[in-house]
Amino acid sequence: MSTDLSTLPPADPAARPAPDQPAPARPNRALRVARWQIYLPLGLYLLFTLVPFYWMLVFAVRPRGSTSLLPWPVSLENFETVWNGLGFGVFFANSLKVGVAALVSTTMIALAGGYALARYRFRGRTAFMVAMLCTQFIPGAMMLIPLFEVFRSLDLVNSLWSLVIAETVFQLPLSLILLSGFIRNVPVELEEAAWVDGCSRLRGFLVVVLPMLRPALVAVGSFAFIHSWNNFLFALMFVSEQEKYTIPVGLAFTLGEFSVDFGALAAGGVVAAVPVVLVFAIVQRYLVQGLSAGAVKG
Amino acid sequence: MAVGEVGTRPRERVRGRGSRTPYLLIAPAVLAMLAFLVYPMASVVYYSLQHYNISKPWENGFAGLDNFTRMLTADPLFWQSLGFTARWVLVEVSLQLVLGLALALIVNETFVGRAAARAMVFSPWAVSGVLTTGIWVLLYNPTTGLSRYLADLGLMDYGAAPLANPDTVFAAAVLAELWRGVPFFAILLLADLQSIPRDLYEAASVDGASRVRRFYHVTLPHLKDAIILSTLLRAVWEFNNVDLLYTLTGGGPAHQTTTLPLYVASTAVQSQEFGYGSALTTAGFLILTFFSVAYLRLSKFGART
């Protein structure tokens, strides 16, 4: 997609060459959409998207007792309450640990498996891919009871590792398939050239393929991180010691209080939102690109 | 979509036939899935045939089909939650699809501020179910919510509490989930829209096709497989979506918004009836598999149009 400046609002029709055609019938005029048909629905939808975020922000920063709907003056007392008083500082650290560990393990395992799928033909390859796809239809909520039993027998209940494992397993199939699509798009000749130069297969992969996978790794890794950061049910079920809570569990308990402290709720929400929204802002461009590139053309 | 790759052969020169390397490379993935997906799934089926309650160990033992009989004949909540699940999935997926497609078509146009608009409209995708609940609880609450400020302006009455009112709780939950769900379709369908060659539209418009006709004859056929797949994935996902309803409505009022997985979760977490919960889970798997296969068959996924 190049930014097609020719479809910007026309400043001066004469500035563009319009050969053989009467002035109004410009080349892709029939394809052009009137500006208001874009901006009106977009504006309405943006309102629906942004008002909730704005609401949370206002309630998080406004001083107690205020009823203003403007985020000014800014008070940090709610953040002070949730971070220190309610333990969000600890929850934040836990969520971060689980998120990073899940990101690393998902990406490593998916990279190895994806490379095998992209570069080798072997017995069971198709069966493996079909199995991967089938896992997408397994509802995580339905796995609560059996996974709990597995973790109990491994003595991992109340350990953050249970969350890392569960996250990795559920993120793995999609990551693996996406990465194998990307690896397939890297010309195999580049790798072969490295082997001719005396590189081992592993070194060839690290030097030649890996750098070209950077956008894919960013997309897959951030998927895994966001997913893990947001997971609630596993964290609620597998971890019951308060010092091991993750952010969503902490937030749910703020919600469940007998009389909800709305300022604290909003501030907790901001704490929960900032990392994922930041990661998302960085990667959303890759996301669409990645999905269209990873899409099959061959 | 990556999923279409099943069965396609790698175009690259094939090397290492018969070598052990590929098996070593997929071994970690296979082992992880065997231990933490396949084995637990098998154990669900086993537990569904057992009386198994952590808090009443003296009653544990083989149950035969008791759990299933109880589910089908003596548990109105099973049927009620199943009915609500169907309604929830149907309403959410169809609304999300329509809005997501419209949004994808809009942000696929070229206009000033497009990159920023995309980033903003997609952003709720990254937000968790619990956070969605937190935000919408603020918006729905009669003292902190939109309604209070609208009432201040004289636009409506004070005291509207959509989540506590049985008449409005469904719509309130649907709206909150839409806020977070529409970007999923918008992102996936935008990725697919970008792969439609522009010439097709130009050719169609030279032939005099109106915009509506171009949409039906060029855009929709091209998006068909992406739509089938994304609706299916989303249906499974919404079926499975416990976070939002668990925290927003708790399945209430009076179990009105309890989905089947939510019912399973509360059976497991609160009453600790793992045997019965496993039977409910098994039923959920069977229902989901049946509908997924039927949907793929009936929609002729992958067939050329």
Image (cartoon, helix red, strand yellow):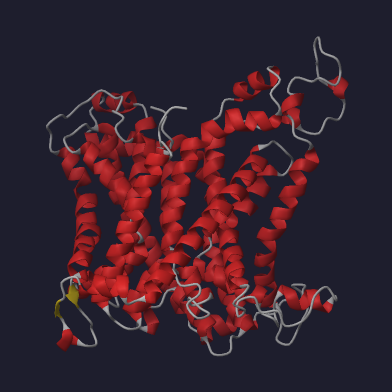
Above-or-below relation of A235 to A194: below
Question: In the rendered view, does B35 fall on the left or right side of B304?
Answer: left
Above-or-below relation of A122 to B95: above
- Residue situated in front as seen by the camera: A1 or B36: B36
- Residue situated in front as seen by the camera: A104 or B216: B216
Q: Position of residue B39 (x, y in %)?
A: 19, 61
Considering every residue shown, the one lying at the far top of the view is A20
Q: Position of residue A241 (x, y in %)?
A: 35, 83
- Residue visible at 23% across and 61% down in the picture: B41
Residue A236 at least partly seen:
no
- Residue visible at 44% across and 78% down in the picture: A90
Above-or-below relation of A115 to A250: above
- Residue visible at 52% across and 54% down in the picture: B93
Q: Answer with the quarter of the image where residue A145 lies.
A: bottom left
Q: Position of residue B47 (x, y in %)?
A: 19, 71
Q: Answer with the quarter of the image where residue B115 lies.
A: top right
